[in-house]
Amino acid sequence: MSMRGTPRKHFSLDMDDRETRSSVSVRKRREVRVKSLFFLITLIPVGLLIVISIALAIRAWPILQQYSLNDLLLGEVWKPQKGFFGFLPFIAGTFWVTIFGVLLAAPPCFFAAVYLSEYARRTTRAIAKPLLDLLAAIPSVVYGVWGMVAIVPLISTHISPFCKRYLGFLPFFTSDNPTGYSILAGAIVLAVMITPFIISITYEVLSVVPQGTREASLALGATRWHTAWHVVLPQVSGGIGAGIVLGASRALGETMAVLMVVGNVAQMPKSIFDAAYPLSALIANNYGEMMSIPLYDSALLGAALFLIGIILVFNILSVIILKGVLGKSWV
Amino acid sequence: MGMKKKWRKRHIIETLFKGIMFLSSSVVVFCLGYILWTIIIKGLPALSWEMISQVPQGGYYLGKEGGILNAIIGSLYLATGGTLLALLISLPIALYMETYMGTSRWGNLVRLALDVLWGIPSIVYGAFGFTIMLAIGMRASLLGGIIVLALLEIPIMVRAMDEVIRQMPKDLEQAALAIGSTKLEVALHVVIRQMLPGIVSAVLLAFGRGIGDAASVLFTAGYTDRIPTSLMSPTASLPLAIFFQLSTPFPEVQQRAYAAALVLTIIVLVISLGSRWLSSRLEKFVIK
């Protein structure tokens, strides 16, 4: 740094030793400068979020002026060429895929995390961590390929016909879609994708509970499950809820894998075997094309803004829950 | 007698839930195995030396000869550049949050912003980046892809580092402060050295995420059959190569998509295992 050689006569510290004086002030000045530089860099995440939202809002503004929010969010017809921009089928698609994905993932993740936290030996934990990391590291496009070659055919040849025959009387289990590209396929792929995330956050939450309370319960003769269920979990149940909410917010943003298996048909889904068209898939499939259609691009970026809004709400919700339950906002 | 019955009921419940937990854990492990198995079985037959050593020749997307070297090199360029840029920004943020903010209100706001950014669909980053690039007259290029990937990786990297820092014992820092170090010196000389294994795994986690992301580079890096020669040339990437080849109607080309998926998976697995090995090597320099 260049300030090392500059004279600092104008600095009047009450110190006799020149050497000490200059070295203290150099270090202090460096501290102050680097601190302010680091502070500026810390503004980047918050700034980026604001800039993205503003940029999307500016681009979405034309469509918000021409249509009411009601028409956009509750309209069921998507025909941009004719000027119909109803987002409801896409919102419903996002909602269904996310809800089913989280519902499929939550129970096994919960039990696996309780197992890791309350039962597993050190070596089991040491093996589990890399496996979860591996699962988290697999790219979403690879999940998509897996979904296409393994899950979709399975649904089309086995699960869907089976459910149609035996569970057809239930409202969500019968469909005329024979392809297997469906909400269920998207939900299964999504469930596996958010598994490592939900397990590790649940595990973190459980590890907040002091070891002593467990030992007290075990010493009274309670079984491990009894301890986990009646002693450990009541203390952190909200935290686990928050973990699942965070998992859902991660799931909302997943684009590529879901897009590859969910069928992408703009319709109101009536069954888990129907094709759906989530918002993120809509943006990915159509952004950059058909720019000639008026307001099309504006509508897509408006959809992106809407997604960011939902994710923001989910995250704030989980922070509030965690703060209330654990007394700290982050695990 | 009553005692005994109660005892047995508790143990039946214990055994039952132990079974459920075992089953749940097995399902997770099974899924991982099933994914890897599917990718290997599908990808291996189509994988050849030609695939990974040549760029696409004429008619490649109709099933003629060539390979995906352009996408492999492009992906490595994109992810390396994006990760370096993200590291340059993430490390100061993580250090600053630890050294000066702790769990203050501002620190929590930054964490919230990072979590929201993490959740934003990568296609939104892509669309945002493309919008900005259009506004400043930049074409789809390696540089555009690198910048957008860096934006995507920053939240992942910072949150991973943040986690490591907050689990560190504070004694060493306090000792350094007590002998008169400034906070900055503590951050640069003590905290960084202590969190080195954590930095390595955070960086490689972000690299893996970056190399696997398709939607963000779709508009910003473009796609080309050539290997990029400068920061301004459009760049192919593996995830998009997989995606495009799958969308063609030719089975031969789809086979190659599976092979490309295998290549991408191998790269990511090597990175994941490598980061584990490297950070365990670095672990021995950490004072516990």
Image: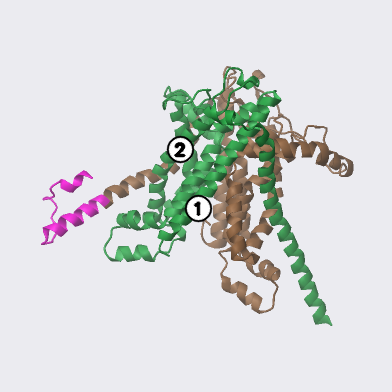
Give the residues drawn in magenta, as a range.
Answer: A1-30
At horizontal 66% and vertical 62% (from top left) the residue drawn is A115
Residue closest to the eye, A230 or A318: A230
Chain to which mark 2 belongs: B
Classify A244 as above or below B42.
below
* Residue positioned 44% across, 43% down in the render: A45
Residue B235: give its label. Answer: none
Picture coordinates of residue A195, whole percent (x, y): 64, 50
Residue B104: x and y in percent read: 42, 56
Q: Is residue A19 magenta?
A: yes
Query: In the rendered image of this protein, does residue B49 appear above or below residue A233?
Result: above
Secondary structure beneath label 2 = helix
Chain A: what color? brown
For marks 1 and 2 on the same chain, the one whose residue lies earlier in the sequence = 2
For this orientation, the residue located farthest to the front is B49
Residue B224 percent coordinates (x, y):
52, 23
Q: Amino acid at mark 2?
A: Thr
Q: Quadrant of the C terminus of chain B?
A: bottom left
- Left/right placement of residue A210 relative to residue A74 reads left
Quadrant of res B185 = bottom left
Q: Is residue A185 magenta?
A: no
Q: Give the labeled residue for mark 2.
A: B80
Chain depicted in green: B
The residue wearing badge 1 is: B277
Q: Amino acid at mark 1?
A: Trp
Judging depth in this view, the residue of A70 and A251 nearest the camera is A251
Q: Is residue A128 visible?
A: yes
